[in-house]
Image (cartoon, rainbow, N blue to C red):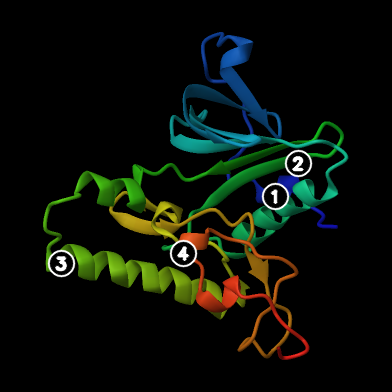
Amino acid sequence: EHSIDAKATSAHSPGVCPFPYPPADHTILINSKPYLILEMIGKGGSSKVYKVLSGDMRIHALKRVKVPTSSHSGLSSYANEIQLLQSLRGRPTIIQLYDAEVSRSNGTILILLEYGDIDLAKLLLRRKGRMLGNNFRRLYWQQMLEAVQTIHEEKIVHGDLKPANFLHVTGTLKLIDFGIAKAIQADDTTKIFRDSQIGTPNYMAPEALMAEDDDGD
């Protein structure tokens, strides 16, 4: 089981609520600090992502996840994501974690992250049918490779590399969504196995789609 020191994740100093009497249903507290909800920008499964305003008037993305308290694997997955993002703080091609709170009693996880403009999948869709310039392709490909190199240097396997998991943040592509990422403890990282297939099939490596056959058939 992963243990989270929620206070250690905070990158903001505590203070009184700066908002003039905000409605309770328009704010979310993370470690007793209020964030004003501006809009919901995404949702899927048990999670919702909000665009929020902090007390120092900065825009952030806030992921709120609700999982059954009996779901040990669900809680552990998000606890793992928080720990990996903590270890990658300060890396320019990785989405930055600012704060987090895990409440095991009611199965709620709150994760405060950098706010991005648009993911690469949507950006490519916008430009569908239009020629991508060489500079565009060179810059984004370089930033994607740098992001992957960064996590591999830390012995982290992301497990779901695809355009939707690269977010455009003030001119830089940043790797996001570490929910199924895995930290490798062994020194030999040439062959990594998982207990089950994880990832998006259209973007998975062929070897990840093939089941291991111990008998060699």
First along the sequence among labels 1 and 4 = 1
Label 3 residue SS: helix
Q: CA distance from mark 1 to mark 2?
A: 9 Å
Secondary structure at numbered mark 2: strand
List the residue tagged with mark 4: 203
Dots 2 and 3: beta carbons under 8 Å? no
* Residue 18 % position (x, y): 53, 20
Determine the residue positioned at 31% across, 49% down. Answer: 170
- Label at residue 135: 3
Callout 1 secondary element:
helix
In the rendered image, the residue lying farthest to the front is 217
Q: Quadrant of residue 34?
A: top right
Q: Which residue is mark 2?
A: 102
State which mark lies toward you, 2 or 3.
3
Q: Which residue is mark 1?
A: 78
Distance between mark 2 and mark 3 Cα atoms: 42 Å
Q: Residues within 10 Å of mark 3 (few under 14, many from 20)?
A: few
Badge 4: residue crowd in 10 Å (few <14, some 14–19, many ≥20): few
Name which residue type carries label 3: Asn
Instruction: Please state which of the two labelled residues, at mark 1 or mark 2, is closer to the viewer.
Output: 1
Upstream in sequence: badge 4 or badge 2: 2
In the rendered image, the vertical position of residue 158 relative to residue 79, given as above or below = below
Earlier in the chain: of badge 1 and badge 3, it is 1
Residue 71 drawn above or below residue 196:
above
Earlier residue among tags 2 and 3: 2
Residue 208, horizontal then vertical, whole percent: 59, 73
Say left or right for 165 vs 64: left
Q: Nearer the viewer, residue 155 or 87?
A: 155
